[in-house]
Image: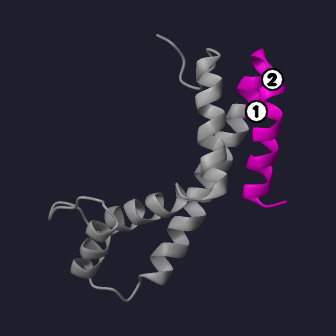
Amino acid sequence: MTTTQRILDLAAAAPASQGEDLVLLLSEANELYQQGLRDLRRDVAARLDGLATADLMFAAERAGIPCDASQDRDEVILLLALVEWEMTSAAMAYTEVAEAAARRGVCLIPEE
């Protein structure tokens, strides 16, 4: 099963989940979200490997990501990967699950 498939399955199960089950579901979905982003970041880095840093900055600006000279190549690649990842069905499903859980008072960040 792919990361996307599993996140979509978790998103489908989320409305019927409550309490600790919803926390566990959200936690698993979060781990999969992070793994998907890491995998995509690796792919984007490989795809853009030969590109000069200035060209990366230009690509980021074209994608609507403001960049400045203080950002290094890895940061720009991560930002480009994040923009691409957030457009995937997996990332959108995770965001929907997290927002719906938050409306129900469930969050992965413990209250202080």
The quarter of the image holding the N terminus is: bottom right
Residue at (63, 19) in percent of width and height: 106
Residue at (60, 19) in percent of width and height: 103
Residue density around tag 2, few if under 14, some if 14–19, many if 20 or more, within 10 Å: few
Residue sitting farthest toward the left: 69
Q: Which mark is residue 21?
A: 2
Q: Is residue 31 magenta?
A: no
Q: How is the image coloured?
A: one colour
- Point out the stretch of residues depicted in magenta: 1-25
Left or right placement of residue 63 versus residue 29 in this view: left
Residue at (77, 18) in percent of width and height: 20
Q: Name the residue under label 1.
A: 25
Is 25 situated above or below 81? above
Left or right placement of residue 70 versus residue 107 in this view: left
Nearer the observer, 30 or 99: 99
Helix, strand or loop under label 1: helix
Residue 85 image position (x, y, % from top left): 54, 59
Helix, strand or loop under label 2: helix
Q: Does the magenta stretch include residue 22?
A: yes
Residue 17 image position (x, y, % from top left): 81, 24
The quarter of the picture where residue 26 lies is top right
Mark 1–mark 2 Cα distance, whole angstroms, equals 6 Å
Residue at (83, 34) in percent of width and height: 13
Nearer the observer, 65 or 34: 65
Q: Give the main secondary structure, helix, strand or loop, of the magenta stretch.
A: helix
Is 7 situated above or below 65? above
Discs 1, 2 touching: Cβ within 8 Å = yes
Residue density around tag 1, few if under 14, some if 14–19, many if 20 or more, within 10 Å: many
Left or right placement of residue 9 versus residue 84 in this view: right
* Dot 1 amino acid type: Leu
* Dot 2 amino acid type: Asp
Residue 105 image position (x, y, % from top left): 61, 14
